[in-house]
Image (cartoon, rainbow, N blue to C red):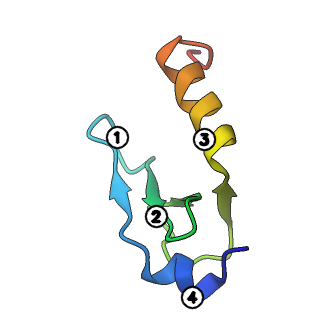
Amino acid sequence: MTTPVEQDEADYKISSFSGGGNCVEVARLPNGRFAVRDSKDPSGSVRLVFGLAEWTAFVSGVKAGEFDA
């Protein structure tokens, strides 16, 4: 389990592909999970936390173009 404090103190990164204010930030957490938050509201309550398998599946889908509009 990841606490809100661990998420607040994480080192979030913005993708180099992000721009125009519609960005997400991703951080690797100490417990091996990944946290995602909205860059416009970094202290907000809406954050997602993924396990390694979930994160790997998501990244693979992005690389395969599964989420292209």
**Residue at mark 4 to residue at mark 2: CA–CA distance:** 19 Å
Q: Amino acid at mark 1?
A: Ser
**Residue at mark 1 to residue at mark 3: CA–CA distance:** 18 Å
Observer-side mark, 4 or 1, equals: 4
With respect to residue 25, does 8 lie above or below?
below
**Sequence-wise, which precedes: disc 3 or disc 4?**
4
**Sequence-wise, which precedes: disc 1 or disc 3?**
1
Q: Amino acid at mark 2?
A: Lys
Q: Quadrant of residue 20?
A: top left
Which dot marks residue 55? Answer: 3
Q: Which residue is mark 4?
A: 5
Give the side of residue 16 with respect to residue 28, left or right: left
Label 2's element?
A: loop
Q: Quadrant of residue 13?
A: bottom left
Depth check: 59 or 47 in front?
59
With respect to residue 12, does 44 lie above or below?
below
Q: Amino acid at mark 3?
A: Trp
**Residue at mark 3 to residue at mark 4: CA–CA distance:** 21 Å
**Residue at mark 3 to residue at mark 2: CA–CA distance:** 22 Å
Which dot marks residue 45? Answer: none
Observer-side mark, 4 or 2, equals: 4
**Residue at mark 4 to residue at mark 1: CA–CA distance:** 26 Å
Q: Which residue is mark 2?
A: 40
**Sequence-wise, which precedes: disc 4 or disc 2?**
4
- Furthest-front residue in this view: 31
Q: Amino acid at mark 4?
A: Val
Q: Looking at the image, do the residues carrying marks 3 and 4 touch, with CB atoms under 8 Å apart?
A: no
Using a 10 Å C-alpha cutoff, classify the residue at mark 3 as few (fewer than 14 neighbours), some (14 to 19) or many (20 or more): some
Observer-side mark, 3 or 2, equals: 3
